[in-house]
Image (cartoon, grey):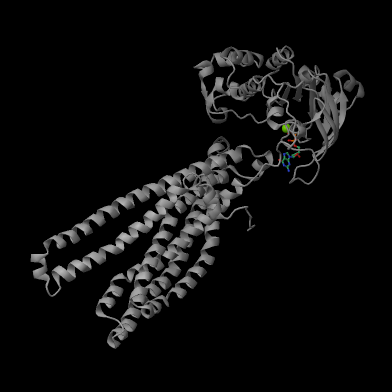
Amino acid sequence: MEKKTFPRTRIQWLWDNMKGKRFLFIVALFGTVLYNAFQLTIPFFSQKVVDEFIAGENAAANLANNRDRFLMLIGMMVGITVLRALVVYADCMAYEHVSQSVLYKVRNILFHKIEYQDMRFYNEYRTGDLMTRVTGDLDAIRHMVAWVVRMIIEAFSLMTATLVYFFSMNVRMTLWLMAIAPFILIIIRVFRIKVGPMHALLREKLAGMNTSAQENISGNRVVKAFAREDYEIKKFDESNRDYSETNQKTQMVWLKFYPYIESCANLMPVVLMVVGGTYLIRGELTMGQYVAFSGLIWALANPMRMLGNIMNEFQRFSAASAKDMEIYYSEPVIVDAPDAIDKPDRLKGEIEFKNVSFKFEDGKYPVLKNISFKAEPGQTVAIMGETGCGKTSLIHLIPRFYEPTSGEVLVDGINVNRYKLRQLRKNIGLATQDVLLYSDTIDGNIAFGDSHISKEEVLKFARYSQASEFIAKMPEGYDTIIGERGVGLSGGQKQRISLARALAVRPSILILDDTTSAVDMETEKQIQNSLRKLDFNCTKIIIAQRISTTKVADKIIVLKDGVIAEQGTHQELIAQKGYYYELVKLQAGEEVV
Ligand code: DGT
Ligand code: MG
């Protein structure tokens, strides 16, 4: 798998995103150390109570004469236990708060990054994969902050405190106990090498499963039309099983290593018995010390056991954070030039293509070759040509969705790459070939580009696009909520709402990509009429196949395999007797029949 490099390490990245909560996080870390220290003080007090008041030589006398001290010790034990519970509670809350705020922040940044990405990005990433990054992957990151870090601190503080105590009692005995540590560290290192790729794979499987679910849900009409439900269910079952099996395999890796770690940890009491026993006989260790070693050996062995689990979770975080950092540090290629000009005013709408060629980054051949034409402000230019000849690619160069490979696209005599993207795109009204409407009211959909426009304006633009009649017949008129992707509307109705949406921004450049293809001829004629009578000036680039649309254009461009084959007015092109002429004949014939 390709290894991506980022400007910050994973931990630095987490730290960056903890800004504003870092102090609380450090307090929480201290809290963890504190409640672990409390845990170690309980045996200290209980040992005192046992020695002085229960099992010691003068226990009975002490209990009779020194009741206050007895009560104080018991009180300390109860007090510390209650205090510890309170610290644990506050500590968990603090970790939860910090982790949720990191999550909130990163999720917003990721969404922002995704929103501002280029078309190229959307060709590259699948929706299901992106959804996994803002859900499952982020959860692994939250888990890291709220749980893994806490476990690491817990393990180390417990171990350190115990080691300090042990070393203060007997250095050699402690070293003997620690002799096991290197073996555990080696085992954990090998485990890390084995489990790391498993987590990366697991994460890919999850993204694959999510993509499959997402595509099936949003494309369920196609599945139904082809009666492929059973097939799709089977396919999903396979990816679900694959994910589940990979999950089990990942857990198995841990299970394979666990017995070794467990055995090493279990060796500690044996070492204590053999070595400690010998020291005891030789008088190098007192009975009290032996008991203290024995009573606290868990505080050394448990953290070692925990390390494996921590490493497992850390690898999960590693795989997930790599995916999120990839988006976090991604930058769109098409951005404002550093010295972009500031044009807040409305543009005139003059468009010129000068020797423009274009090839998709992942494409083999150029899609557009040496395109040159000009549209004066207010003119209508029709673009025609066979399917796949490059019409959509051509119009996508105007709002700078892609950059030409060579040549220049000019608006008002200025190269589009010199404008601020927002200012350029604000001047363009685009009705795309695939109509995508939002799950919102019809009114909300039309006003998408400018939420401040008045109801009257919405009605006017709906009239322009011949949509007002069918909207009036809908149950709640303009307040009717249309389903995801405009479910509940016909193809032609969707196209007309999309046209109204493009008009509602009062653009100086209106681009219609086959926007009336699903509309009947009569309605289309009325739309053409209203487009001529708009109450604002605008240059229109219209991709269309019907002669009825193109013949009224000031200029018709016929594209063939990415080059301009013919260019001129309806009359001029008929006189040329080329592709356009053939098309006129064909469509006239259709109309007669
Ligand atoms: P249409 O809408 O079917 O009438 O066809 P056009 O003329 O709008 O074609 P267009 O511009 O969408 O596509 C031109 C060629 O470029 C066609 O061979 C498909 C290819 N193409 C379109 N989009 C992409 C893309 O994102 N990546 C690559 N590599 N090729 C693309
Ligand atoms: Mg197209």
In the image, 545: left or right of 92?
right
The C terminus, quarter of image:
top right
In the displayed structure, would residue 390 be above or below residue 361? Answer: above
Q: Position of residue 526 (x, y in %)?
A: 70, 13
Question: Closest to the observer: 414 or 537?
Answer: 414
Q: Residue at horizontal 32%, vertical 49%?
A: 89
Q: Is residue 228 visible?
A: no
Extreme right residue here?
A: 576
Q: Position of residue 251 (x, y in %)?
A: 45, 61
Q: Quadrant of the N terminus?
A: bottom right
**Where is 468 relative to 130, above or below?**
above
Q: Residue 334: percent from the left, percent from the top?
A: 71, 39
Q: Position of residue 126 (x, y in %)?
A: 60, 44
Question: Residue at the location (87% across, 28% down)?
Answer: 566
Q: Is residue 352 above or below residue 189?
A: above
Q: For the point 54% across and 14% down, which residue is it?
A: 473
